[in-house]
Amino acid sequence: MTDVSTILQAAPARPGPGPQPRRGRLGISPLTPVTYLAALLLVGVTVVPLLFVFVDGFKTNAQINSSATALPHPWDTRNYTQMLTSAAFWQPLENSAVIAAIATVLVVVLGAMAAFALSRYAFPGREGLFLLFAVGLLFPINAAALPLYLMLDKLGLLDNPLGVALPEAAFGLPITIVILRPFMREIPGELEDAAVVDGATRIGFFLRILLPLSRPALVTVAVLAFVQSWNQYLIPLLVFTSQQRFTLPLAVANFQTQYAQNTASILAFTALSMLPALGCFIFAQRHLVGGFTGAVKG
């Protein structure tokens, strides 16, 4: 096949960056202190409450009632060990993992195919179809609760993991297509022409060239779909009636109702339920930045 680097070198050069912001004598932009201050405020608002949840899980109820903001003295690990050795944590964790995996695979596969068609093909109504997906971002799940429940009831998907995974995938498709379409449009058309000349089909170009080059965007939408499914509360609440099928958000709410006075255990349960989503974000943060950057440029 034709060398990809040769094609990219032959592609017309993009215009250079615009004028740079004026810097002071020390080479520091006047906006830098404001940016750092905004970042610190954002970190304080988002991270500090999470730290309190994790730290207070190492306290006893008496310590929390005495001072909720002080550090544990002594540090007590019984709340976490009890959760990690209890089926009340592991069964919902398995349920959430299965549903999130199904929803993520559906979102990435269907979203990539739809974005490929909307970015590389010209057909009547293409922009209107893309606008329809974009409008889907404004559609709240709460408004679809009743019709969604009735439809799942007719399909026999109540109390079924697919009854949760399929709607989650449907609600995750709009943001997936909005991110993937501009990213795929930025891939040079010369690559597709060279692949066709060398005998590759449209599907071959999609699988062998376009998807590997779109890896940052694919990781981005996969992480977003996984986290959205992991944190989803309303759809599992509508679908599941058996506690054996509860996902982690439902299990945490149910545990909080049953053990309302045991604040320390509730905080430990909540902290453990957040770890997979946080780990997913930390693991894929480099790809997330690249995916969002490509989507904005497109």
Image: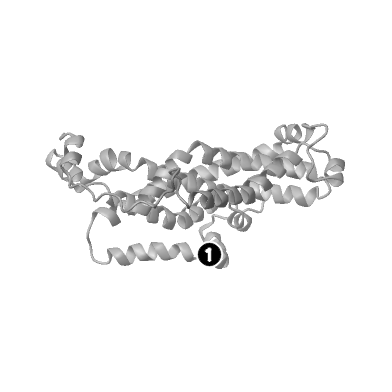
Q: Look at the numbered disc 1 and give the secondary structure of its residue.
A: loop
Residue highlighted by disc 1: 140
Q: Residues within 10 Å of mark 1 (few under 14, many from 20)?
A: few
Q: Nearer the viewer, residue 206 or 17?
A: 17
Q: Residue furthest front?
A: 25
Q: In the picture shown, does residue 143 fall above or below 104?
A: below
Q: Dividing the picture into quarters, in which one does residue 136 lie? A: bottom left
Residue 35 on image: x %, y %? 51, 51
* Quarter of the figure that contains the C terminus: bottom left
In the rendered view, does 267 fall on the left or right side of 112? right
Confirm whether residue 161 shows in the render: no
* Quarter of the figure that contains the N terminus: top left
Q: Nearer the viewer, residue 52 or 223?
A: 52
Q: Nearer the viewer, residue 250 or 291?
A: 291
Q: In the picture shown, does residue 143 fall above or below 49?
A: below
Colour scheme shown: one colour
Q: Dividing the picture into quarters, in which one does residue 85 lie? A: top right
Confirm whether residue 90 shows in the render: yes
Residue 245 on image: x %, y %? 63, 46
Residue 233 on image: x %, y %? 61, 54
Total count of labels = 1
In the rendered view, does 212 fall on the left or right side of 139? left
In the rendered view, does 274 fall on the left or right side of 164? right
Q: Amino acid at mark 1?
A: Pro
Q: In the picture shown, does residue 173 fall above or below 190?
A: below
Q: Residue at x 87, y 42 (%)?
A: 62
Residue 52 on image: x %, y %? 72, 44
